[in-house]
């Protein structure tokens, strides 16, 4: 692979969630704090939604790390469950409890017994259900009933439903009115803004032992941040593909041309998107920063004056010295 070529200790852009590479984006940290507070306040059921690739599963792993050993937790990664029996079996299995050869009611009673004993021992239990948009009304009702279990006026089980936005439509169905009233916390994950998207790439390279400013040019960071529209999964895919392309071409760094080709391979258009936030100072060890003068046009690169740390004057737009501003337009390969 490309690790040796770029002086990396490991791959910076994996295909599966890895807590070592968690990026504390503002929206993600806010969602994480809200859910964690709901759990410690015994709020009952919390809902976390987000479009595919926005980092929901990784946020779940991060939440479990923060909860610590004083919390008994179960994480159901597969919510394609045919009935209540399968749900209860999956829950017991993840708690390392017996689940075979038991009727639905026996499974339920075994689970309730564990939840109450765990609570009496001074620990709470948290169930995270990933891809919860696949749960039907009957299974959601089962989770509501389990979430009603109380001891000493506090809930013995707290549930976090992690899903694509389609779950919200399901929760609004009339037959789930009781569940709706027990969901005090609803948070949503959004794509990263352009600054955070570029910083995400920088942070992953740095966490892999590399020097971001020598591996990605500022122009490449701009192209990838915009082209992926700030979706972490796409940032991982295009970042990985860009490093592969640069290695195969024996390049020392990923430039804008390579970044655009990586976007094309992943199936993304390499142009300015509709995001409106400004990208600047993303390659933190670099002396350059990127600004966007007109979000409907191509990105503009301004170089920093290395002597005094101030931005150099534009080179196409006249300044006081009659100089003009130079617009950076990412190069395109010949047709």
Image (cartoon, grey):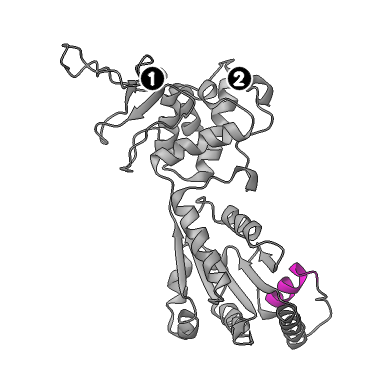
Percent position (x, y) of residue 101? 84, 80
Q: Residue tagged by mark 1? A: 331
Spot occupied by residue 25 in the image (x, y as percentages of width and height): 47, 48
Q: Quadrant of the N terminus?
A: top right
Quadrant of the image occupied by residue 222: top left
Up the image or down, 11 lies above or below 251; here it is: below
**Quarter-of-image position of residue 65:** bottom right
Q: Which residue is mark 2?
A: 248
- Indicate whether 5 appears above or below 11: above
Name the residue nearer the viewer: 251 or 44.
Answer: 44
Q: Residues within 10 Å of mark 2 (few under 14, many from 20)?
A: few
Residue 165, compared with residue 258, is above or below; it is: below
Q: What residue lies at 30% left-to-right and 28% top-to-bottom?
A: 298
User: Residue 158 appears at what percent x and percent y?
Assistant: 60, 75
Q: Residue at x 74, y 75 (%)?
A: 89
Query: What stretch of residues is rendered in magenta?
Result: 86-96
């Amino acid at each position: 692979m490309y690790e040796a070529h770029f002086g990396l200790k490991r791959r910076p852009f994996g295909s599966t969630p890895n807590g070592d590479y968690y990026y504390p984006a503002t929206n993600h940290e806010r969602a994480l704090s809200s859910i964690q507070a709901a759990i410690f306040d015994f709020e009952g059921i919390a809902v976390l939604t987000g479009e595919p690739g926005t980092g929901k599963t990784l946020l779940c792993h991060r939440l479990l790390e923060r909860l610590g050993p004083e919390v008994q937790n179960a994480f159901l990664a597969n919510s394609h469950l045919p009935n209540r029996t399968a749900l209860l079996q999956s829950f017991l299995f993840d708690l390392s409890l017996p689940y075979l050869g038991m009727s639905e009611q026996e499974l339920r009673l075994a689970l309730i017994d564990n939840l109450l004993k765990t609570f009496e021992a001074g620990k709470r239990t948290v169930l995270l259900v990933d891809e919860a948009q696949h749960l039907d009304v009957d299974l959601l009702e089962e989770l509501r009933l389990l979430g009603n279990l109380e001891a000493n006026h506090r809930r013995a089980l707290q549930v976090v439903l992690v899903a694509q936005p389609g779950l919200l439509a399901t929760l609004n169905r009339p037959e789930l009115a009781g569940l709706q009233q027990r969901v005090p916390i609803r948070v949503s994950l959004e794509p990263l803004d352009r600054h955070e998207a570029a910083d995400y790439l920088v942070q992953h390279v740095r966490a892999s032992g590399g020097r971001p400013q020598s591996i990605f040019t500022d122009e490449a960071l701009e192209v990838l941040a915009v082209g992926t529209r700030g979706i972490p999964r796409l940032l991982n895919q295009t970042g990985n593909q860009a490093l592969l392309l640069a290695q195969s071409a024996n390049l020392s760094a990923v430039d804008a041309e390579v970044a655009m080709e990586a976007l094309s391979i992943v199936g993304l258009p390499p142009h300015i998107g509709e995001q409106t936030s400004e990208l600047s100072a993303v390659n933190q060890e670099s002396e350059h920063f990127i600004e966007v003068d007109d979000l409907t046009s191509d990105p503009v690169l301004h170089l920093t004056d290395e002597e005094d740390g101030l931005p150099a004057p534009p080179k196409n737009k006249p300044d006081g010295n009659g100089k003009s501003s130079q617009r950076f337009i990412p190069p395109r390969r010949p047709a």
